[in-house]
Image (tube, grey):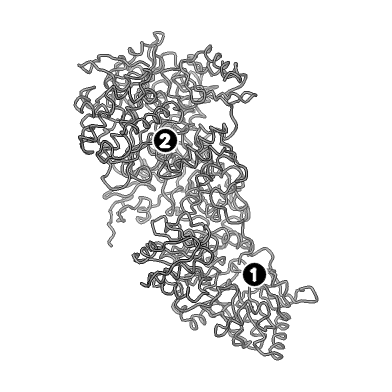
Amino acid sequence: MAEELVELTIDGVPVAVPKGTLIVEAAKRAGVDIPVFCYHPKLTPVGACRICLVQIEPTPRLQAACTTPVAPGMVIHTQNELARAGRESVLEFMLANHPLDCPICDKGGECPLQNITFAWGLGTSRFREEKRHLAKRYPLSERIVLDRERCIMCLRCTRFQEEIAGDSSLVVLERADHSEIGVAEGREFDSIFSGNTIELCPVGALTSRQYRFQARPWDLDLTASVCGGCAMGCNVTLSVRDSELLRVSSRDNPDVDNGWLCDYGRFGQVGATRENRVTTPMMRRGNALVPVTWAEALTEAATRLTAIRTAYGADAIGGIASPTMPNEALFLFNRLMRDVVGTGNLDHYPRPPAPARDDLGFRGAIADLDTVEMILVVGVDAIAEVPVLHLRLRKAAERGANLVLVHANPTGLTQEATTWIQPAMRGEATILRALAAAVQGGKRPAIETVIPVDLAPVVAQWKAAEKRMLLVDPALLADPSVADAVAALLPAAGGPVVSTANGRGAIDLGIFPAGGADATAAPYMLDGSAGVRGLIVLGGDPPVDHAETLIVFAHHLTAAARQADIVLPIAVATEEAGTLTNFAGRVQRLRRGPALPGSVEPAWYAVKELAGALGQPIPVTAPEQVWEAIQQNVPAYADVTDAELDGVTPPRMQTIEQEVAD
Amino acid sequence: MIPNPPTPFPTREGGGNTEAYVLSDTTRAAIVALKGKYPKVQSAILDALRLAQDEIGYVPAEASAEVAALLGVSPHHVHSLATFYTMFFTQPVGTAIVEVCDNLSCALWGSRRIIARLEEALGIAVGETTPDGSITLLRTIECLAACGGAPALRVNTTYYEKMTEEKVVALVKELRPGKR
Amino acid sequence: MASVIEETATTTAPFEPFLTASVGREGAWEIEDYLSRGGYTGWRRAVSELTPAEVTDWVKRSGLRGRGGAGFSTGTKWGFVPNIPGPKYVCCNADESEPGTFNNRAIMEWDPHIVVEGVMIASYAIGATHSFIYCRGEFGLAAERLIQAIRDAEKAGFLGTDIFGKGVDLQIEVFRGAGAYICGEETALLESLEGKRPMPRSRPPFPAVVGLYGRPTVINNAETLANVPFILKNGPEWYAAIGAAPNCGPKIYSLSGSVNRPGNYELPLGITLRELVEHGGGMREGRKLKAVIPGGSSAAILPATLSDGRDAMDLVLDFDACRAAGSMLGSGAVIVLDETVCMACAVTRFIEFYQHESCGKCTPCREGTIWMLKILERVTGTGGTDDDLFLVNDLASHIPGRSLCLLGDSAAAPVMSAMEHFRTDFDTHNATGHCPSGCIPF
């Protein structure tokens, strides 16, 4: 469908843009810089701040470029006397009551208000009155603090919470010059998406309590990476000063996160580099774990594993990997267990109860949510499991997609859904089977749930929809009849939403017991029933009930690590280089932000070292080499390009979509 | 793996304290009944806040949270509206709110003298409430739309026009407790 | 507040007020009373005899122009509503809060049915089946009377489903505000009605296309709509003959300030200020005119001698003449100021109002009004400087056309006009630290 183009000129530059484009966006195409504060391409334009005033011939009354759509033949001026005077006066008004406390403001250095004042302001103020005094350090939550004097009422934060997060958990209180951002009395700013407002804030009004007064932006090293918090794989920018991770911010990838992060990813990952770390190899001496060198730990591990293998055979050894580990570590762990140790006792934990079937892989991409007509969500509670997926589902519902939710309990999406089917216990499986049968043209089986459900409308909608997506809780697939049902529905896009950070990678890389043997699945290795005497745990914190020898590659001093005989310290996601695969099968690159603390090593390296200690060195020296090996060995990953791995946005300061002329 | 999730997931809208209701069953029922009045439920917030204020005399935080829960909207948003509109009081006020119009047309007919007389008769300043909690004296910034009867004032919802110093003194006597 | 029956210079036939004829008459708000006066004849005719397009055409031909301030052709405004399926709405703007304006309250309290019938006819004309009267929160009695009127009209079969057996459905709700001048701005009114913070929207899109709940919407002032039943009852030509085209029909002038009998005076559009003041019993205590605000506080203040040298008493009070004189008829709220009034104090009071009523959304209005107020409070308090006066005037000039809605322009107009015409009042404050006239006891 050809877009209807509108031709106009901005500051003498001719430009053609699709009908309906706002002037502020058309100006970007024309290479003309129009300053903005309240405008944000992902939020509804409000025309509040007025900094983007431009003149459109022949009207002398200025128009807001952020709310005025283009019209054919428009002649727009951003630099003439009228526009300049308008902009300067708006800036003068804006700064009149602003505290100008830039030297102690976290935003200083990456502040649109600072930059725009520098680029467009008069440099003087005629304001001689007492400035307005409002709360300077108002704690909105344990994550976010508000400086009400700095706020310029751009309403980005409140629009984000209303339009994107959908919870209106941050609002404007009062009116006129004492308007202020806030929450209901006695409440907190209690949204798990609250951190996005810090990035959206074009001044230093909303700041992170975690990052507050930690650094100046110009002292930060920025690294493009991916969040290792869940299976969404949101793209992130890691801000590091003096080798320490100080903050995590978004890095817009329209195919994945749309520029948003949840507070777990944003704040939790910083805490994860600091608290409760294991920073040195340790060995058990009596009841205590004592620090040792890598060489001592590896030698001891190899000695013990070799002894077990000699005495009881290789199958007395088992390996359990966390599905949060990067692909590189998982791939080498697979090699370690199968080729070096020589056993098929390998699994990841936690994982969906049944190994993947080829016909149950995720089809299409997350971004298909922007175009599909119907979305069927079965058993997935996105806001709890993959929070940013919740935002994309909300957005789809807002644009009018038919969102059908099958979930026993109310979820964050209940209010957004077109239809919410609330089955009784395990009723999701019944409904999937019935749906598949009906779609396949068979007779619709009766639905034996507590709440009688008439599936006919949903079946009809599913059949009628041209583009549709199915998102299903992978736990349901343990039942082969459900797996068959899902497979039958999966000519549609979608598939299981494996929620652990690299759960999909673990499946793709075959971190399963040999031959899919149930008897040696992770739970049985953990409780001792699989006959495993020596257990190697890579990351995570599986509940180990029984192991004669327990070797744990640990990033934190977890319960498993405390039980271990040998602890080998490994990196967390923000310290790793490698790749993660999100639930939709998109492989993305992790880059190391902060330095590795103590004698911590990347997981892939630590695994490789253990293989070496066992006498079979794996000849790789960098994670990129491991990735090459993965591409050669895993067909699904053969064609992944560097562009896909890296995402679309370079790492950047903590201000979304600000472009200011030098 | 992220070991320290920031805080628990938020409860959905209206998850406030439900143990002790501050509104009566009648008011709660009336608020719930508002749900069908408008094409969208959010439109009913002002009506609901008015019902709450009619019962309690003002809108404490617990009341706006209850309104939010009953209508199924964000408690923060309800609070936002309660603080925007001047007719809602988030702090306690007197049983009778005496609001003297002090915009230009009334000022030209002596509203400032009326206010001074009321302050004297009530023993309080504008913005204050008598110690017995019976009368709050306010001066309006807005025009009361009674310029033809300047100077005008309102006592709660009732307009009094063409006021004189004598008339307001008599009015104060009427408003004193026991007289109403 | 008695209506005034008077022959005027611009009409040859004697003018019988009809909008305020029942104001002040006990029981006039009852439906029986209204029916005995021929009430709902226009509604019946519209539904029974005319198509919606014909109704719009009648209103266009009547020459009725919006009484809320803009003076735009009401019929033309209705004609902007696209003929598309789905809900459409009529919102009657009865949030009368412009300082100096008090005619909506009068007609709604005494004769609510004329407003309700006007809403009905407008709804029919644009195809709305669910309409709203946005009643100012302070107007408790008016809201009560409107609600009763609607209930009685429902009982009489004028509202509901299949009205007059013509397949027309309509329900009307009274929506009560809660204390915010900005809700008189039509897009803020829509936001308020939707339960959002009443902050004006950017235009385009215009409410006729994207209005209440995102649907096509007509917003008319209560006084405007009160005229409509009479147009339908007596015909557009009858209506157009009142006043002097293109300023047709009667206007309820809300006369206040320094006159002996402030009040609502319903007169044909086009009378002069002198005539209106005479209706109001002349200047208070025989004082001389100093200034007049012809259209509520948002209109520019005109001095006793107009810029073209004419006596302001000769100003014709219609939409076009007021605009030509550098101000506007606005809501028809004529505030008369006599020689004892200090314009610096008067303007400061207005700015206090606009500052308080700024919604806070856009920068120039939010910051500009408080800045101007701080300077003006100093000037009228202990006295300021020439620089203060230059700055306040300059700030005022930076707000119009840059704020999101017209509240900013409205706040600037009195400041700039007072500074232009009454600079000496400000200078005296600065020089003496006291009010020059000890005028109104501010």
Classed neighbour count for the residue bearing mark 1: other residues with Cα under 10 Å, few (<14), some (14–19), many (≥20): many
Classed neighbour count for the residue bearing mark 2: other residues with Cα under 10 Å, few (<14), some (14–19), many (≥20): many
Which amino acid, by three-letter code, is at mark 1? Leu
Q: Which residue is mark 2?
A: C175
Q: Residue sitting at 31 percent across and 29 percent down? A: C224
Secondary element under disc 1, as helix, strand or loop, is loop
The part of the image, by quadrant, that contains residue A563 is bottom right
Disc 1: host chain: A
Image side of residue C110 versus residue A338, left or right: left
The part of the image, by quadrant, that contains residue A245 is bottom right
Q: Estimate the x, y position of residue A509 in percent, counting from the top left.
A: 53, 79
In the foreground, A626 or A500: A500
Answer whether residue A344 is visible to the viewer in this image. yes
Q: Tell me the quadrant of the picture where the N terminus of chain C can be found.
A: top left
The part of the image, by quadrant, that contains residue B147 is top left
Answer whether residue A371 is visible to the viewer in this image. no
Against A389, residue B148 (above or below) is: above
Secondary element under disc 2, as helix, strand or loop, is strand
